[in-house]
Amino acid sequence: SSDSDSSFTQNLPELPPMVTFDIADVERDGEGKCEENPEFHNDEDLAASLEAFELGYYHKHAFNNYHSR
């Protein structure tokens, strides 16, 4: 088993760096979202940003439909 352990360790640097960063991001995202985003504690702010996003999305969607005719 010691042979497989050493070969595994030698292969680690060949992995792209993004893989380790992705894993770290996933672990962080799952914990304490409220603490990390204090600006979203206000429900009105959250509703306003969602509303703006939806308005922008629907406007863009209607614009695309208009041009596809």
Image (cartoon, rainbow, N blue to C red):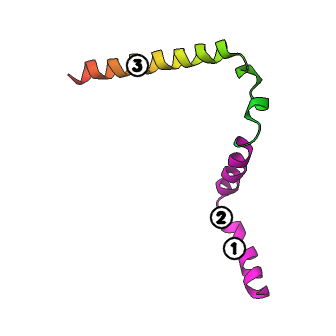
Q: Which residue is mark 2?
A: 15
Task: Please determine whether, in this image, residue 3 is positioned above or below residue 63.
Answer: below
Going by the numbered disc 3, the residue's amino acid type is Tyr
Secondary structure of the magenta portion, mostly?
A: helix
Q: Quadrant of residue 29?
A: top right
**1 vs 3, front mark:** 3
Measured from the top left, where is residue 38 in percent x and y? Answer: 77, 23
Callouts 1 and 2 close, C-beta under 8 Å: yes
Q: Which residue is mark 1?
A: 11
Few, some or many residues within 10 Å of mark 2 (<14, 14–19, 20+): few
Q: Which disc is residue 58 wearing? A: 3
* Along the line of sight, the residue nearer the viewer: 54 or 41: 41
Going by the numbered disc 2, the residue's amino acid type is Leu
Measured from the top left, where is residue 39 in percent x and y? Answer: 73, 20
Going by the numbered disc 1, the residue's amino acid type is Asn
Q: Residue furthest left?
A: 69
| Label 1 to label 3: alpha-carbon separation | 48 Å
